[in-house]
Image (cartoon, rainbow, N blue to C red):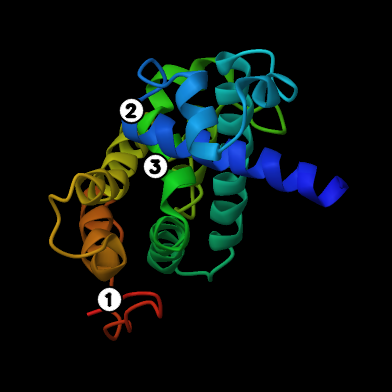
């Protein structure tokens, strides 16, 4: 019985993220979530008091997951370019493995981020700026890290958005090296092009 309840809640949350990603927060209703998850609306209200509570709870949870993936990636090596590549690979691989939670966060970021803090009470913008600063040996060299963080984030995220709209011929994991090179040029990091990486095992030809 307990396992079934957990499964149903998981189904509700996953289908909610799918709809929030596809239709946006405003364009998604509890009725649509219930229909896709094959539950009653009452079943949803047993877990969440409102659509807003559900969206914010899921956004906070999935954003923390992305944060921890990025933190792990920043231990990839001493070479800043290698760490940057690991960050890009982590995001694109997460999107390949399970696209809807990643798209849910990316496509609803502007609407929901203002009401969410990460698990250590650090705002997500502060985390992105710190992550960019930590790519360099010295973080107090006069660089405009706020601008660099914004620019790097845009370069990394746009391939995901374009791919989700079927405007990119290949999956973003196929562009890891190209995006890394572009980011390195933008922030002034030396980057030696690595041996071409093999496509992720889930990719099909």
Provide the secondary structure element on which disc 1 rests.
loop
Secondary element at image label 2:
helix
* Closer to the camera in the image, 143 or 63: 63
As drawn, 125 above or below 174: above
Which of the 4 quarters of the picture holds residue 39? Answer: top right
Which residue is under mark 1?
192
For numbered disc 3, what is the local secondary structure?
helix
Q: In 3D space, how far apart are the residues under numbered discs 3 and 2 (Cα atoms)?
A: 11 Å
Question: Mark 3 or mark 2, which has the lower sequence index?
Answer: 2
Vertical comparison of 198 with 37: above or below:
below
Instruction: Write down the residue under mark 3.
Output: 103
What percent of the width, then of the height, locates residue 102? 45, 45
Please indicate whether residue 44 sits to the left or right of residue 168 in the image: right
Q: How many labels sit on residues?
A: 3
Look at discs 3 and 2 and give the one toward the viewer: 2
Residue at mark 1 to residue at mark 2: CA–CA distance:
40 Å
């Amino acid at each position: 019985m307990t396992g079934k309840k957990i499964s149903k809640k998981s189904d509700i949350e996953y289908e909610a993220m799918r709809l929030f990603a596809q239709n946006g927060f405003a364009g998604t209703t509890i009725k649509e979530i219930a229909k896709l998850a094959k539950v009653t609306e009452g079943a949803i209200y047993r877990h969440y008091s409102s659509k807003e509570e559900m969206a914010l709870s899921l956004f906070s949870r999935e954003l923390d997951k992305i944060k921890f993936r990025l933190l792990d990636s920043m231990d990839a090596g001493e070479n800043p370019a290698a760490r940057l590549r690991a960050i890009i690979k982590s995001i694109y691989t997460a999107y390949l493995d399970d696209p809807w939670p990643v798209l849910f966060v990316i496509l609803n970021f502007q609407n929901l981020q203002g009401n969410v803090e990460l698990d250590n009470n650090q705002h997500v913008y502060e985390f992105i700026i710190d992550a960019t600063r930590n790519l360099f040996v010295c973080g107090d060299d006069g660089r405009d890290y706020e601008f660099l963080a914004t620019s790097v984030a845009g370069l990394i995220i746009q391939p995901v958005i374009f791919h989700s709209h079927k405007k990119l011929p290949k999956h973003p994991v196929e562009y890891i090296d190209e995006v890394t090179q572009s980011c390195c040029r933008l922030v002034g990091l030396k980057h030696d092009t690595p041996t071409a990486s093999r496509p992720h095992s889930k990719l099909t030809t």
